[in-house]
């Protein structure tokens, strides 16, 4: 029985890891392009949840359409915010961080002002459960996981095969060289940021039907994205994959064997240790 | 905190304005309780004093070019250390302050040793993680901290047989603490060490090139700043009488950062001004807490762009402009005087750099 | 003439690329040595290793008979080796005065505790620093810009301030990375005169990286040439022109300068 419990939590850990990955990829992309730690990343997750609430529960659009709408809106809003708010601080990451902290405050408390503190719940997209031997997985979770898999695949194809995606990757690798190759790095900033916020918003939108939506839902995913990205290495996309799988699984497994607070503390201690001894993360380069 | 915050061109005037501003702020703080017999003003003045103490420490760290997101946690460590010593061991106040200061200094030194070699962004992230870890530990170690319930019944400040039980007597203690730390910040920033701080903040590589150890400077700033937060934390614990871990999380650090950003990161008067302006805000916007946070957010977004030197810098600059405009005639005269100096300089340039008789030996 | 700086078989790799491969060179007391080579030859890398901004992958750097390879840059500066940077490198936001004062700090002893309890000690330091800064500014013809932010100076003035910053640390050995790049011919000439005078007045030793061959040959007693991280020549300037390896390395772009 204990074995099947562990297997059960492993599966749900993988699902959770996928959602962490969505968050972490956007976060990592923004850091890779702009060298700025985006403290407002969790708020875009939160806004994604509210966006889905508006489209799916209120306007009663189909789920897929709602998610696509949320994504598009988040990309545009993100790019516009980068242009309006962060642009003066390119090349000044410390002030950039101060500004994203400010942005997070404004977004979260703006949402609080408008929507109030009470969680809104959404109708579920699908119901029922899926069984495989002793494993039971809620269909809604599976649905969210399948969706995020599609988004992840799309994102990787975009980075690998599209010209814009390759340009973005070149800027992440080395902005100077990218410039020399004729890539317009100036465009990479708003669109890289927009894409990052778009991924956060999708994660929020996919999670919204599973849990409820409130102005505070972004806090935990932001922390998880931090941890994933620190573990995997800043600006390293493969590192983000590894980091989120590790975190998703340890999260679920540790949840069984350790008290939640001990698990949380261990995570932070792990983060501090990794930052101190291997600041570029497990898969990051050696240059710091 | 930024790459561009070297000591601003501070001609005598602006410096004087800064001094006047700081003194005025201190006087306002001292006079606040006298405005009315309403104890609310006294309460406000005490909070401003405490925030000034915290913000000055953070300002010191910022002056060396670092952004610490665990400043609130150090306030918490100080508060808990003081409270536990007082409650469990009935330690005297001076001992509590000394112990909390030393504890925070030691923690900061340990953390700093490990991380100050890291680039700015990584440093900030470790401080963030450290702050969270401290909050979680305080929640978890209930044998020490009372867990989520916090610690209650912390008595008034006792010093040499005197009990600072009344609000007013506590206010005197807090005011003394705030004035002391502002003075300390001022002496430090205007000393040769302060110069080294500015150099490291503006361009650490160049600072190393001219013989300043960026690591040591940052360490000094981080240890002194965090230790002063710990000392302030003891005062806070005694004033509130009750502390709990949630009060010392990330939001407190952000509030303190907002004060430093608003007041100005390069002037000793900055943290004081920031505390003076932002502490009353929650009281004014009592019913709409989110509005207060939105205002903080807007400050963090707009001030770095509009007033990179914060209020202290802005007032100094405005005064310089006003001074020029008001001076009228004499102001017209000044540039010519400067031009004279420059033509003299050009003369020097001619004789020193290109003596007409001697051609450069570089040309064969 | 004793040897002040002795670089022995120093290599530095970036990934697979050997930016420096077993390079040896020396600078004697009071000697002016040039370091030339085409773009990417490893000149800046060599200066960075000597000044402690980079660690060598192998080899030793001895200064005054003391191993300094791997020491942090600020310590090497304190030992008396100062450098300038290829790009204009000044504290752009600070005034010229503050720039120089920051650099002059190294030679001022300032007790921290003395400063905290009273400002007498720091006032005394401030006084000596001020005097030193003013003298330096005079020497570099920067006196009238003292209260201007360094970033607002012209390119030429910033270059000059960069050298003044290095000199404010009172070095015995000065490493200059392309000090006249981007200056017009007249400024070049002025700079050469200034350097010559500084060098004589203070019995400085100089290691001078420069593409401007006339500038190098006019100032230096000896020139070391690098190409692809290897030393290809070490000779007095007059012999350099006839060195086939150097001519080969420079074939094309810099040929004219040799004519
Ligand atoms: N930090 C670094 N990382 C990777 N490669 C580097 C680094 N610094 C220098 N290099 C490489 O090492 C080689 C030597 O560079 P270096 O800057 O020393 O050349 P240089 O002689 O100063 O050239 P220039 O005349 O253009 O200044 C170059 O190929 C350069 O690309
Ligand atoms: Mg070079």
Image (spheres, rainbow, N blue to C red):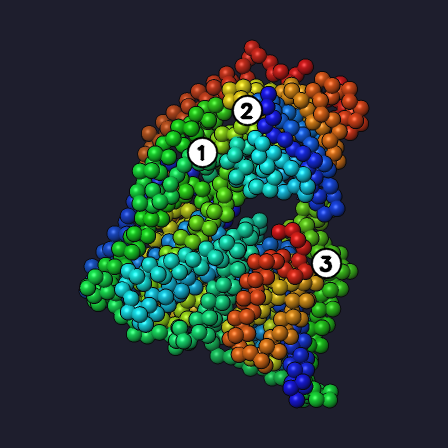
Instruction: Choose between B38 and B46: the one closer to the eye.
Output: B46
- Output the chain of dot 2: C
Q: Residue furthest front?
A: C65
The answer to whether marks 3 and 2 mark residues whose Cβ atoms lie closer than 8 Å is: no
Q: Position of residue B145 (x, y in %)?
A: 39, 73
Q: CA distance from mark 3 to mark 1?
A: 52 Å
For mark 3, give the secondary structure.
helix
Q: Which mark is residue C107?
A: 1
Q: Position of residue A111 (x, y in %)?
A: 50, 70
Chain of the residue that carries numbered disc 3 in the rendered image: A
Q: For mark 1, name the chain.
A: C
Q: Is residue A173 above or below residue A237?
A: above
The residue positioned 41% from the left and 71% from the top of the image is B245
Residue C14 is drawn in which quadrant? Answer: top right
Q: Closest to the observer: C151 or A120?
A: C151
- Separation of marks 1 and 2 at Cα, in angstroms: 17 Å
Identify the residue at horizontal 43%, vertical 64% (top origin).
Answer: B73
Q: Position of residue B231 (x, y in %)?
A: 34, 59
Tell me if residue C212 comes above or below residue A164 in the rendering: above
Q: Is residue A7 left or right of residue B231?
A: right
State the mark number for residue A205. Answer: none
How far apart are the alpha carbons under marks 3 and 2? 54 Å
In the rendered image, which residue does mark 3 sit on? A165
- Which of discs 3 and 1 lies nearer the camera? The answer is 1
**Disc number at residue C204?**
2
Work out whether disc 1 and disc 2 sit on a shared chain. yes
In front here: A283 or B56? A283
Please tell me which of labels 1 and 2 falls first in the chain: 1
Image position, residue B313 (x, y; %): 40, 46
- Which residue is rendered at x = 57% and y = 64% of the image? A271
Q: Among all residues in the image, which is located at the extreme top?
A: B357
Q: Residues within 10 Å of mark 3 (few under 14, many from 20)?
A: some
């Amino acid at each position: 029985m204990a074995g099947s419990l562990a297997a059960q939590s492993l599966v749900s850990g993988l699902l959770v890891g996928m959602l962490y990955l969505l968050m972490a990829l956007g976060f990592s992309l923004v850091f890779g392009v702009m060298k700025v730690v985006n403290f407002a990343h969790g708020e875009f997750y939160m806004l994604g949840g509210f966006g889905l609430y508006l489209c799916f529960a209120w306007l009663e659009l189909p789920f897929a359409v709602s998610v696509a709408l949320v994504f598009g809106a988040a990309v545009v809003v993100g790019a516009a915010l980068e242009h309006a708010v962060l642009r003066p601080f390119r090349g000044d990451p410390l002030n950039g961080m101060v500004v994203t902290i400010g942005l997070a405050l404004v977004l979260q408390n703006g949402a609080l002002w408008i929507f109030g503190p009470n969680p809104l719940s959404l109708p579920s997209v699908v119901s029922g459960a899926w069984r495989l031997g002793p494993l039971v997985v809620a269909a809604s979770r599976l649905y969210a996981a399948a969706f995020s898999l599609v988004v992840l695949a799309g994102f990787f194809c975009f980075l690998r095969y599209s010209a814009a995606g390759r340009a973005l990757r070149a800027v992440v690798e080395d902005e100077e060289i990218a410039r020399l190759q004729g890539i317009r790095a100036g465009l990479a900033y708003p669109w890289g940021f927009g894409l990052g916020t778009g991924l956060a918003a999708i994660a929020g939108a996919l999670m919204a039907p599973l849990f409820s939506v409130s102005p505070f839902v972004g806090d935990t995913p932001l922390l998880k994205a931090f941890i994933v990205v620190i573990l995997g290495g800043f600006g390293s996309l493969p590192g983000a994959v590894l980091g989120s799988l590790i975190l998703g699984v340890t999260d679920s497994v540790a949840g069984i064997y350790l008290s939640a607070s001990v698990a949380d503390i261990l995570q932070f201690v792990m983060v501090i240790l990794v930052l101190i001894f291997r600041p570029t993360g497990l898969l990051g380069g050696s240059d710091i | 905190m930024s790459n561009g915050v070297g000591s601003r061109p501070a001609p005598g005037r602006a410096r004087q304005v800064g001094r006047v501003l700081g003194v005025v702020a201190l006087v306002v703080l001292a006079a606040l309780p006298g405005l009315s017999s309403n104890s609310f003003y006294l309460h406000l003045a005490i909070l401003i004093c405490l925030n000034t103490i915290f913000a000055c420490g953070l300002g010191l760290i910022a002056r060396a070019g670092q952004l610490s997101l665990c400043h609130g946690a150090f306030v918490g460590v100080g508060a808990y250390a003081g409270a536990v010593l007082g409650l469990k061991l009935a330690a005297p106040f001076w001992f509590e302050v000394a112990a909390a200061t030393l504890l925070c200094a030691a923690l900061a030194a340990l953390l700093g040793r490990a991380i100050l070699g890291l680039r700015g962004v990584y440093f900030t992230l470790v401080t963030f993680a450290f702050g969270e870890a401290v909050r979680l530990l305080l929640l978890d170690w209930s044998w020490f901290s009372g867990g989520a319930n916090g610690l209650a019944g912390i008595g008034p400040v006792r010093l040499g047989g005197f009990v600072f039980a009344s609000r007013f007597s506590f206010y005197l203690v807090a005011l003394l603490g705030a004035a002391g730390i502002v003075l300390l910040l001022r002496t430090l920033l205007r000393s040769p060490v302060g110069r080294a701080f500015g150099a490291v903040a503006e361009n650490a590589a160049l600072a190393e090139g001219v013989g300043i150890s960026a690591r040591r400077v940052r360490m000094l700033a981080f240890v002194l700043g965090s230790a002063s937060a710990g000392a302030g934390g003891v005062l806070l614990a005694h004033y509130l009488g009750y502390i709990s871990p949630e009060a010392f999380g990330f939001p407190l650090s952000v509030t303190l950062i907002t004060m430093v950003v608003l007041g100005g990161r390069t002037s000793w008067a900055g943290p004081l001004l920031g505390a003076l302006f932002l502490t009353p805000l929650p009281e004014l916007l009592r019913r709409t807490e989110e509005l207060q946070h939105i205002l903080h957010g807007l400050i963090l977004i707009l001030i770095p762009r509009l007033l990179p030197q914060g209020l202290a810098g802005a007032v100094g600059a405005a005064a310089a402009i006003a001074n020029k405009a008001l001076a009228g005639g004499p102001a017209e005269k000044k540039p010519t005087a400067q031009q004279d100096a420059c033509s003299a300089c050009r003369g020097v340039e001619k004789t020193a750099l290109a003596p007409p008789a001697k051609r450069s030996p570089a040309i064969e | 003439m004793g040897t002040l700086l002795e670089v022995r078989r120093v290599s530095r790799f970036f990934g697979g690329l050997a930016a420096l491969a077993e390079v040896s060179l020396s600078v004697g007391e009071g000697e002016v040595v040039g370091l030339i080579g085409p773009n990417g030859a490893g000149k800046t890398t060599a200066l960075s290793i000597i000044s402690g901004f980079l660690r060598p992958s192998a080899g030793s750097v001895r200064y005054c008979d003391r191993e300094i390879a791997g020491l942090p840059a600020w310590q090497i500066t304190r030992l008396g080796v100062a450098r300038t940077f290829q790009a204009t490198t000044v504290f752009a936001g600070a005034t010229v005065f503050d720039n120089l004062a920051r650099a002059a700090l190294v030679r001022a002893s300032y007790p921290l505790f003395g400063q905290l309890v009273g400002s007498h000690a720091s006032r005394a330091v401030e006084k000596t620093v001020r005097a030193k800064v003013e003298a330096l500014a005079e020497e570099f013809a920067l006196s009238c810009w003292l209260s201007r932010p360094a970033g607002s100076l012209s390119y030429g003035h910033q270059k000059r301030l960069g050298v003044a910053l290095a000199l404010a640390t009172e070095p015995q050995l000065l490493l200059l990375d392309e000090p006249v790049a981007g200056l017009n011919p007249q400024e070049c000439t002025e700079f050469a005169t200034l350097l010559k005078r500084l060098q004589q007045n203070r019995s400085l030793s100089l290691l001078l990286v420069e593409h401007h061959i006339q500038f190098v040959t006019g100032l230096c007693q000896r020139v070391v040439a690098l190409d692809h991280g290897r030393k290809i020549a070490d000779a007095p300037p007059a012999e350099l022109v006839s060195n086939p390896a150097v001519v080969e390395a420079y074939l094309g772009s810099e040929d004219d300068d040799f004519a």
